Amino acid sequence: MAGFILRRLAISIPLIALASFLVFVLVAVSGDPLGELRSNPSITEAQIEARRHELGLDRPLMTRYVDWATGVVTGDFGRSAKDNEPVVDKLGRAITVTLRLLGGALSLAVLLGVAIGVAAALKQYSKFDYASTFFAFVFFSMPVFWLAAVLKDAGIRINQLIDFRLFFTIGEKDPTVVGGFLTVFGDRVGHMILPVLTLILIQVAGWSRYQRATMLDVLSADYVRTARAKGLSPGKVILRHTLRNALIPIVTLVAIDFGLLMSGAVITETVFAWNGMGRLLVRGLLDRDTNVVQAWLLVSAAMVVLFNLLADVAYGYLDPRIRRG
Amino acid sequence: MRIHGKGNVARLFLTLLCVALVAGACGGDDNNEGGEAAQGGAEKPGGTLVFGADQDFAGYNVNTVPDNSLAAGQIMKQVWSGAYRVKPDFSLEPDVLAGEATVTSEDPFTVEWKIKPEASWDDGTPLSSDDFELYWQMCNGKNEAASCASTTGFDLIAKLDKVDGKTVRAEFAQPFSDYKSLFDDIPPSHIIKQRSPDDLVKGWNTALNEDPGASSGPFKVGERVKGASLKLVRNEKYWGTKAKLDEIIFRFLPESTTQPDALRNNEVNLIYPQPQLDQVETVKAFPGVHSEINFGPTFEHLTLNTKNEFLADKAVRQAIAYGVDRAAIVARLMKPFSDKASQLDNRLLVSTQKGYEAHGQEYAEVNVAKAISVLEGAGFKKGATGIMEKGGKKLSLRLSTTAGNKLREQQGVLVQAQLKEVGIDIRIDNAPAEALFGERLPSGNFDIANFAWVGTPFPAAGGYQLYSAASGSNFGKYSNKTVDQKLLAALAETDEVTRLGLLNEIDKIMWEDLPNIPLYQKPTFLAYNTKYVNISDNTTEESPFWNSETWALKA
């Protein structure tokens, strides 16, 4: 297994390096990060050039890329062209916020997707199955940004109805909240409800359908019929013989969809004004801030690679044949 | 197929749920009128106001180039006092000054500033002539390493004397009438000297990046979460009128579409975004929220490149002025915001400014026939395509504006259609803001450009910056010696009435020359929760925070 992991990492590194170079060039040539200064007639050309020199923007593109790449190896992601803050500080803040959002969304989406899919498969053609199918198609068809806006509006209307602010529409926390652990925890959770709901509704829609189909396949397998014929209880048949096999394909799907979840998080963070990786990327692109965009790319690519590795490890746990192979 | 009773219930439930979802998606207003503006009345001490800010900021020294941003300006206006405060009517009120800055000598032109004896920093250090001196030293343009967002005026001071701890006297190399524009948002020199004793320039540039050090205003900086929020807390040591609120919290929401919902949900209490028509209409319907549209100093205009072969001909510029229906543009794009919207007929003063006069009345209303006649008089003839031609060349011009700005793109389409009737072919050639301001305008790579200039309480300096022949911001390369002379005279004229008279004379000449065509003043949009009192708009760079120390909760 260790050798397998190392091989996967070895393949990923040149891929990420190539992607980083392409993104660097594209962002660098897409516009001037100092363009905003030019619209201010009080700021002279000499001042703009001085700022350009200070940020290193007057150096050749390849030199800038090589400097950035060598800095990354030592943990220096450079500074933001917008506000001169070290990019690693921005990243640190953004990652913790996004991990909170993705962690909550992913865990709940997997649990709910699997549970609903399994239940729908076990009770095929029941009212629950029809209802879950209907809602899956409804939410699967919704674009993330639209669903986010609808949930925001619904949340505000509910708040007005109950005269209590249960749902929050901006930020990952309320700067006016002070208090003990429970108060702060309650505030954080309150801010998570709508964004997490936005992400999980669409993911659960897709994953539950997939899980249902996989479960139905496995339920119709000969060995399952044999297990029932041997007199095993339905619970044991499902938990010991069916579920583990039915989970293998969903692990692949979750790993692949992690990238989609991250892109959904970009939109969700923008709509709900969360100060996470998504907002960092959007601001970096709008400001033509190459160092910020590069850092985002590296971290996101690393997270996708890590997730795929975790998926492979999970296979090994679920199916001993893969482990021994 | 027979339908079961329970199936009916399920279907009814699903139908109702769909209807609820769709209704939620369709939105719809609450059919409630917005609240009345809350001015005066019984007040409750203390409390917090949360402001939904358009953008985050970098460092605190707004006087440096990297930190000279809208957000930093809104924050630091409340933390660092300046010589003057600009009121909503563009008039100036002494802030840290004990009285008006006085001209003590006309030749050499010398101005004296006396600081209030009680003006001080919250650490007890008096606000003194040292602070004025350092400001001038960093912004006089003599030290290239010192970053200064505007050296205008400071670079004319030949000598600055500290008469005593509370009085400075500056001798100018030439008369400068806008001396009241100097020493805005004064940074604490003693903090800069403490943090960077061996390199004051470095201290000025960077020592105040992470915190502003000291406060001389009604609020001081509290906790900051970069990218998310900043707290301003009441400065208990403020030498002026103590703030009534305990805190003002800035929440940074650059995604302006999130601001109305945040206001509706009481997560923010005040917003001041760039107005978008759908947002304005939505916010107007919020219960318990007051909103208002005002017209600020920023004005849209068309700059004509006088180096273009056609636009070099005054007749073509006149035809454009006759042919562009400014009233129709205002009616289509600005009237939906407010009935008070109107076209602007002066390029040096805005309509809300003292001394404003409307000029260029012959171009006030569209006159297609006159436009055509002027072109024909200049030797143009309509070709088979309906476009004017001269010497075998079609009268075809590019119109450029900032791509992605919906309002400007609509404007461009309107102008194109209007000038087509005159026989002028307009090709839309928009560019991203960075390309337009960074390359095209400075290099003269444009024919007609549509963008905005910001009016100022100091129109002489502003006019000189925009229209003098030598100015880098004179993108159309307009040159008129008389105008240049009058601009210099206005810069030097200390009598306000005379100065305004000069500026109006300059504008009349420019309506003859037509280097650009002013269109209209852009609106500002202010919305706040009516549980707060004493909030009012200030469309200058002071923004609505100009009187934040008077804001309070309604009792």
Image (spheres, helix red, strand yellow):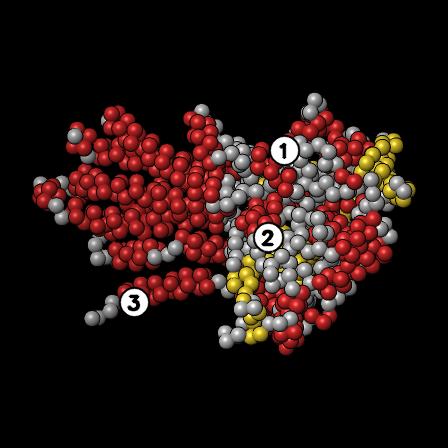
Q: Do the residues labelled 2 and 3 touch (CB within 8 Å)?
A: no
- In the rendered structure, which disc, 2 or 3, sits on the residue that comes first in sequence? 3
2 and 1 marks on the same chain: yes
Q: Which amino acid type is shown beneath numbered disc 2?
A: Gly
When asked about the image quadrant of residue B65, the answer is: top right
Query: Of the residues tagged 2 and 1, which is closer to the observer?
Result: 2
- In the rendered structure, which disc, 3 or 1, sits on the residue that comes first in sequence? 3
Q: Residue at horizontal 64%, vertical 61%?
A: B312
Q: Mark 1 points at which residue?
A: B209
Label 1 secondary element: loop
- Specify the subunit that label 3 lies on: B
Q: Position of residue A247 (x, y in %)?
A: 23, 41
Q: Mark 3 points at which residue?
A: B8
Q: Can residue B478 be seen in this view?
A: yes
Q: Are marks 2 and 1 in contact (CB under 8 Å)?
A: no
Label 2 secondary element: loop
Q: Residue at horizontal 28%, vertical 64%?
A: B6
Q: Name the residue under label 2.
A: B444
When asked about the image quadrant of residue A253, the answer is: top left
Query: Of the residues tagged 3 and 1, which is closer to the observer?
Result: 1
Q: Which of A89 and B520 is in front in this view?
A: B520
Q: Residue at horizontal 75%, vertical 33%?
A: B137
Q: Is residue B90 above or below residue A263?
A: below
Label 3 secondary element: helix
